[in-house]
Amino acid sequence: MEQDIRRPAPILMVEAEPPARQRLASLVEEEGFDAEWASCVAEAREAARRHRFALVVCDLKLPDGDGLEVQECFQETQPGAGFILLAEIGSMASAMEALRRGALDYVEKPLRSARDLKRAIQRAAVLAAGSADPAAKGEAPRATPGLCGSVVARDPRMLHVLDLLGKVAPADVHVMLIGETGVGKEVIARCIHQQSRRAGRPFVVVHCASLSPGLVEIELFGHEPGAFAGATGQRQGALERARGGTVFLDSVSELPPSAQLRLLRALRERRFQRPGGQQFLDAGVRIISATTRDLEAGARDGRLDQDLLARLGVFPIEIPPLRDRPADIDALAEQFLAAAAAKFGKPELRLSEAARLLLRSHPWPGNVRELENAVERAAILSDGEILPGHLPFGGMQALGPAAAGTLNVHELERKAIEEALRLHGGNRTRAARELGISLRTLQYRLKEFGLTRA
């Protein structure tokens, strides 16, 4: 299950700008990778003729072309080399095209932190090692995001997550999901399991934060009769119940130290004993863990053992919060509304345009879970068209359902724009993104509503 992320072949870094090149060089050296450098498409092609590379990390914008040309060159000359594209936030169409052509990953520029690229390189190395494993070929189902109907995505960031999901599912490695509460980490974990070679085996969930320290170990490893006071019978733990399947550890950073050490030992030795027992049991399960905390922070503050982190975090995936992917709000709302209509026997339910606008303007601190709850509440209150007054938040809440229902669409749109600008301190670019409209459309609306000084 464990993969060695250090490959014998070097990495080719293709970057034209000297300052960015220096930052990348420091990062590569810190991680212990050997690297060669190219500053343009022509130099990358020459490097491809001279040497073989395990991985190519390439900027999209180059003096004599773009990163997609470099990708095409390596697909023709070294199809086994992994490819990561560095693309500016405004170049998501090119990033998605690179993924469609077979890139292992992309990273947004400017880098928020060095860990973004570190994680991308780590993921790419794991996937490259998995694809080179003859035993892994031909055994797994073809993994594509479309196979998991419970996940809806239109935003490029979430589409990227689904692309990673499809690639890692057949690779029998541990996965760590990082994201705020409510972003859907358990849903993503189930999708990975469903698309893996373990799909026919159990998927067992352990909510680490909701259990006391003593109960966590019992839930993971079970116990024998007499193991402790009150243990009158034998109990199977999650590792045993999974029986070759997947164990999902939610809030893994909340595992108590003793449970972390016992789990680490079980993963190292691929076997464990029930507390109070002598028999060794197979621990050949896949672990998908989830945390709301940054991996490095969890290790620094001592909450997560670094050796355990290294094993569980072989393939980290960050799930973006809903506020950072507004293009998904409409699609998710429609999905939740259809489910609520079926649940409550209200086939006529539909979202008004004003309600859609308010959904897009809400900051969603509770993420997808909050959206689902809001839509279900609205479905209970309405028998037909869902209006802003049926929603439990935003500027309309202060008006009350009756007053909100008397406002026309233009008044609702104005209030939603004012709320979005307020939430983002007057930043129009962020407000437009929150509302799911273009900056040009927002500027037009501001002029129309007399809000140009907002």
Image (cartoon, helix red, strand yellow):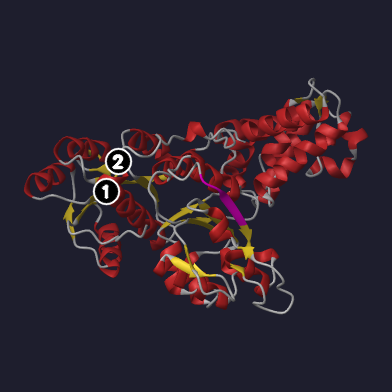
In contact (CB < 8 Å): disc 1 and disc 2: yes
Residue at the (70%, 73%) spot, across then down: 231
Q: Quadrant of the C terminus?
A: top right
Q: Give the structural element (helix, strand or loop) at label 1.
A: loop
**Residue 444 lies in the magenta stretch:** no
Q: Quadrant of residue 306?
A: bottom left
Q: Quadrant of the N terminus?
A: bottom left
Front in this rendered view, residue 182 or 423: 182
The residue singled out by tag 1 in the image is 133
Point out residue 160 in the picture as x, y percentages from the top left corner: 45, 42
Separation of disc 1 and disc 2 at Cα?
A: 7 Å
The residue singled out by tag 2 in the image is 137
Vertical arrangement, residue 123 with respect to residue 256, above or below: above
Q: Is residue 451 visible?
A: no
Residue at the (40%, 62%) spot, across then down: 115
Front in this rendered view, residue 321 or 299: 299
Residues drawn in magenta: 201-205
Question: What residue occupies the far left of the structure in this picture?
Answer: 50
Front in this rendered view, residue 280 or 101: 280
